[in-house]
Amino acid sequence: MTKKTLTTIVLSLLVIIGLITIWYWRTNPDRQIKKTLAIMAELGSAPVGESSIAKALKAKKLGEHFSPDAFIEWPGDEIIPAGRWANRENITQQTLAAKNSTNYQVSVEDPKIESARRRRDATAEFTLVVREGINTTWAWLGVAKLLKNDRRWLVTQLTFTSILRP
């Protein structure tokens, strides 16, 4: 075996290992779901100065992360009454109404994902933090059920339990 042949074999193996690593990293459900949740938090936020058009476009884009028959459910307390938003269209409309009512920032913290590779379903537990202004913060424990539709993860069910009040 010549030095040139050996070099070609080694380089080929390195390329193959690199491609497998990239494929594994890109198809990792844990990574994909965490990214989806972060994007959803960004789209659900209503920062100061956001135009009405931007709010509507972001609410529509957020709705696309839910399955058509998805729902969001939360328990009530002395500040926020219990509620349920059912179906993608209603979730989009309610999100837009919330974005138009006040300015706030949403973030997803400490996501824990349960999903096996090559499975089409997953569960994510996380803390949803909403900051309104400088001193007002709410946080809820969230549980999302997700289903992989082709290459995208869609939320089918999202439930919250209040854990922190202002």
Image (spheres, rainbow, N blue to C red):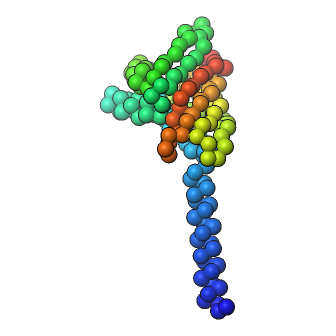
What is the x, y in percent for residue 86?
A: 48, 19
**The residue positioned farthest toward the bottom in the image shown:** 2
In the rendered view of the protein, which quadrant contains the N terminus?
A: bottom right
Query: For residue 6, which quarter of the picture?
Result: bottom right
Q: Is residue 163 above or below residue 79?
A: below
Is residue 33 rendered to the left or right of residue 92?
right
What is the x, y in percent for residue 9?
A: 63, 80
How many numbered marks have been drawn onto this rendered protein structure?
Answer: 0
The answer, for residue 38, to whether it is visible in the render is no
Instruction: Give me the residue at 40% from left, 24% from top.
Output: 89
Query: For residue 109, which quarter of the picture?
Result: top right
Between residue 73 and residue 54, name the one nearer to us: 73
Q: Is residue 35 above or below residue 82?
A: below
Instruction: Give me the residue at 56% from left, 26% from top.
Output: 157
Instruction: Give me the residue at 48% from left, 31% from top.
Output: 66
Between residue 14 and residue 58, name the one nearer to us: 14
What is the x, y in percent for residue 100?
A: 39, 21
Between residue 119 and residue 163, name the one nearer to us: 119
What is the x, y in percent for residue 87?
A: 45, 23
The answer, for residue 60, to whether it is visible in the render is yes
Query: For residue 5, which quarter of the picture?
Result: bottom right
Instruction: Give me the residue at 55% from left, 36% from top.
Output: 147
**The residue positioned farthest toward the top in the image shown:** 78
Is residue 18 rendered to the left or right of residue 101?
right
Between residue 7 and residue 110, name the one nearer to us: 7
Q: Is residue 77 above or below residue 41?
A: above
Q: Is residue 72 above or below residue 76?
A: below
In the rendered view of the protein, which quadrant contains the C terminus?
A: top right
